[in-house]
Amino acid sequence: MARKRAGKVKGAPGHGRPAPERVDGVESHRPEQCAGCGASLAGRIGQAYTGYDEVDWVREGSGWTVRITKRLDEECLCECGHATRAEPARSTEDGVEIGGFRLVGAGPASLIVALSKRYRTSQARIQELLHDWLDVWISTGAIHDVLAEVATLVAPVEQELVQAIQQSDLLHADETPWPEQGASSLWLWVFITSQTVLYYISHRGQELVRNLLEGFTGLLMSDGWQSYRWLAHRLRCWAHLKRKAQGLVDSLNPAAQAFGREALALWNALREEACQAREGPPGISLRPRWETRLQAFRTRCEAMQGHSHAKAPALAVEFLNDWEAVFTVLENPSWPLTSNEAERALRHWVILRQISHGTRTPQGSRQFALLASVIDTCRRRGHSPWEYLRTAITRRRQGLPLLPLPPVPV
């Protein structure tokens, strides 16, 4: 039996992007000077040699509307006989082509990012929504390309985020497992300040933390993961310790129960006194008043290291390893007691992880982290991330530099 040839069968209907039923405007791109002799081409009649229909979603008055623009690239004939063609700005960054000649305008591109990341919508459902509500048909492949392009367009802002993190006075950090097809033991990291959020997908070792925070002189609030312990100035999240202490209280071992109750009583007293101190004058250390009680609890932790119950000595060792980080908050009660800021930042993306099952490639992981960083930083600073993305897409496609992230409103 003859083997079937690859490709479309002769006579079969083709499949492509349907032509728009209307065109709302025409924009021509004409060369300004001759590529041969350098003479000005002003006033020369151009001839369109290629064109495309760009669909955009723009604000008109108090609402939004879909606008379809036919963009034409022209060529002009100079007196020297050289024909010069207008070429849209194009380049390739991280393997992704960016620049002009895009069928999806800045408005729909920003909307696609919002639907995918903020509203956790699949590409198939995004296609359905755009078709049903905006009467715009975009293939799932084009939607995938848009997400990759927008992440690449905003990639230069990553260095700005890194500098903001490194120069912060108080930084929260946390991490959660992140699945990537073909990779193992990857984690989604978050580093968050009062104005900046930075995400990375990487392994859980010290390499990422050291590369990012080498020379960091601020205060880091984190859990007890060992990758943070090399930092000199650190706060230890009490919520993690409290959960482990409650686990001991709920156990069946009397000695473990007693140790868990002591840790919980210490936490409740510390939290109550810290909250009261925040209502008084700032700058007053509570450490001198707590020294006797801390020394007694330290002795208790040292005695529990050899206990037969597995989790009781584990909690005791955790206290001893992070002793200063746990109780540094007594020196300034205005400092946070938990890493809830970082955990709340991760919660949205953990839900997305459950829906999407993570990412498929290293490029997809990086693109996800970049978009998540820009979205959450803009929202934390009180600005619309979608307005920023629209401006970023428009400028970068024109070959213009990316604007800095908007600052916190005064």
Image (cartoon, rainbow, N blue to C red):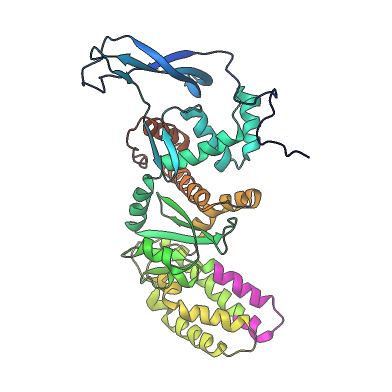
Residue at left offset 32%, top offset 33% = 400
Residue at left offset 35%, top offset 68% = 284
Quadrant position of residue 185: bottom right
Across and down, in percent, residue 116 comes to 57, 40
Query: In this picture, is 264 found above or below 12?
Result: below
The outermost residue toward the front is 1
Looking at the image, residue 93 sits to the left or right of residue 215; the answer is right
The one nearer the camera, 404 or 75, is 75
Across and down, in percent, residue 20 comes to 57, 17
Q: Is residue 304 visible?
A: yes
* Residue 249 on the magenta segment: yes
Quadrant position of residue 1: top right
Q: Main secondary structure of the magenta part?
A: helix
Query: In this picture, is 212 found above or below 292?
Result: above
The one nearer the camera, 152 or 96, is 96
Q: Quadrant of the C terminus?
A: top left
Across and down, in percent, residue 194 comes to 41, 52
* Residue 96 on the magenta segment: no
Residue at left offset 29%, top offset 10% = 44
Looking at the image, residue 179 sits to the left or right of residue 216; the answer is right
Q: Is residue 382 visible?
A: no
Across and down, in percent, residue 203 comes to 50, 64
Residue at left offset 35%, top offset 62% = 282
The one nearer the camera, 62 or 49, is 49
Query: In this picture, is 325 found above or below 173?
Result: below
The outermost residue toward the right is 1
The one nearer the camera, 242 or 215, is 215
Q: Which residues are magenta?
A: 240-259
